[in-house]
Every structure is written in C-alpha cells, then in structure tokens.
Amino acid sequence: MPQYWERITPAQRARLRVWRGYRRLYRALPRHDHVRAWPGRLLREISTVGGGPWQAVDRIPPAQLFGERVWRGRAPLDRVFLPVLGQDASITVVPTDAKTVARRMVSSLEYERRALTTAYQQFRFAFPNRVCPALETLRERELALLVDALDDLAAYELRHPYPVDLHVLYDAADPYC
C-alpha cells in the first residue's frame, strides 16, 4: 500500500523490505523441514510464526498510518461474512445460517492449531493418564461461544476466486451491509 509508505520510519521500511525478500526466498527454496542446522531451524521458526514478531513488522501502530481515523470504541456486530473459495471466477454472496458459519469457523480454528494438537497427541501417547481438559473440550467450547455470539445475526457466504482483489470483494459485500 504505497500511500502509507512515507508514514512509516526508514527503519520500518527497511524491515519490510527484508521481510519481502525473505518471503520470496522462502517460497523459492525447496522444503527444509529435515534440516537440523541453525539456518534451517531459523527459517522453519520464522515460517511457523509468520516472521512478523521476529522482524518487528507488526509493531507499526495503526495511528501512525491512519492518524485520527482509528476507531477506538466498541463496534456492533450485526452481520457476519464467511469468505470461502468459490467454484467460479465471479464473486457471489449467498445467505446462510449463522450456526453454519460458527461450525465452519470452529473447523478452521481446529485446522489452524493442528501443530498444537499433534504435540498434545504425542504427549498423551507418552503420558496416557495426563489430560488437559482445556484442549480436550476446546472445540465444543468454541462452538458454544460462537453459536451464542452469532445467534440471530444475518450471515453470508462470500464465495470468491483465488487470488481475489480485496476492493472487488468489498464491493460485492457492500450491498449486504
């Protein structure tokens, strides 16, 4: 977003340039999961955490970019959009049930924590009598919280191709807002 480039410090711009270079390099290299030497471990760690904290890229305060246009108050939640990959090259908005959105969100969250789940399953294999109730019941608790939070909201699937232009995606959702 070049319109914000001048609003960040030279050090922040340098970190972003390094980060872009790293992302290009990481995509160009073959898989390195088997490498145990420190460069491989470092690349794997950065790729796992996204590199943002390591690069300090995520430390740009929103007010630095947007000034007084940063909303600090509460925002009402009166509808929910679930972006999903569609079959077509077009973007379509399909009304759906908020409970369906909640179930799909929980499945997405479960997928995102698969590394934690794998480690926990390995732990359970080694220590079958030791249980973490928080992890054992996480999906059910997440589902209950999301169903409660989204109850009675208008819900939509926002089906789009990949990659998608965010402006076009916004324009498709805007009539439903």
Image (spheres, helix red, strand yellow):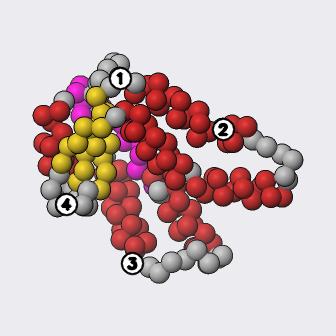
Which residue position is annotated with label 2? 137
Q: As shown in the figure, which amino acid type bears the numbered disc 2?
A: Thr
Q: Are marks 4 and 1 in contact (CB under 8 Å)?
A: no
The picture places residue 19, in percent across and down from the top left corner, at 39, 61
Residues 49 and 154: in front is 154
Residue 5 among those drawn in magenta:
no
The picture places residue 134, in percent across and down from the top left corner, at 69, 37
Label 2 to label 4: alpha-carbon separation: 37 Å
Q: Earlier in the sequence, mark 3 or mark 1?
A: 3
Q: Are marks 3 and 1 in contact (CB under 8 Å)?
A: no
Which residue position is annotated with label 3? 28
Drawn side of residue 107 relative to residue 64, left or right: right
Which residues lie in the magenta part?
55-69
Q: Residue at x 63, y 72 (%)?
A: 38
Residues 47 and 159: in front is 159
Nearer the camera: disc 2 or disc 1: 1
Q: Earlier in the sequence, mark 2 or mark 3?
A: 3
User: Dot 2, how many residues are within 10 Å of its Cα: few (below 14), some (14-19), or many (20+)?
Assistant: few
Question: Image quarter for residue 157?
Answer: top left
Q: As shown in the figure, which amino acid type bears the numbered disc 1?
A: Asp
Which residue position is annotated with label 4? 88
Question: Image quarter for residue 176?
Answer: top left
Q: Main secondary structure of the magenta part?
A: helix
Nearer the camera: disc 2 or disc 3: 2
Q: Earlier in the sequence, mark 4 or mark 1?
A: 4
Q: Are marks 4 and 3 in contact (CB under 8 Å)?
A: no
Which residue position is annotated with label 1? 152
The picture places residue 160, in percent across and down from the top left corner, at 23, 54
> In this orientation, does residue 81 appear?
no
Label 2 to label 3: alpha-carbon separation: 39 Å
Query: Which structural element holds mark 2?
Result: loop
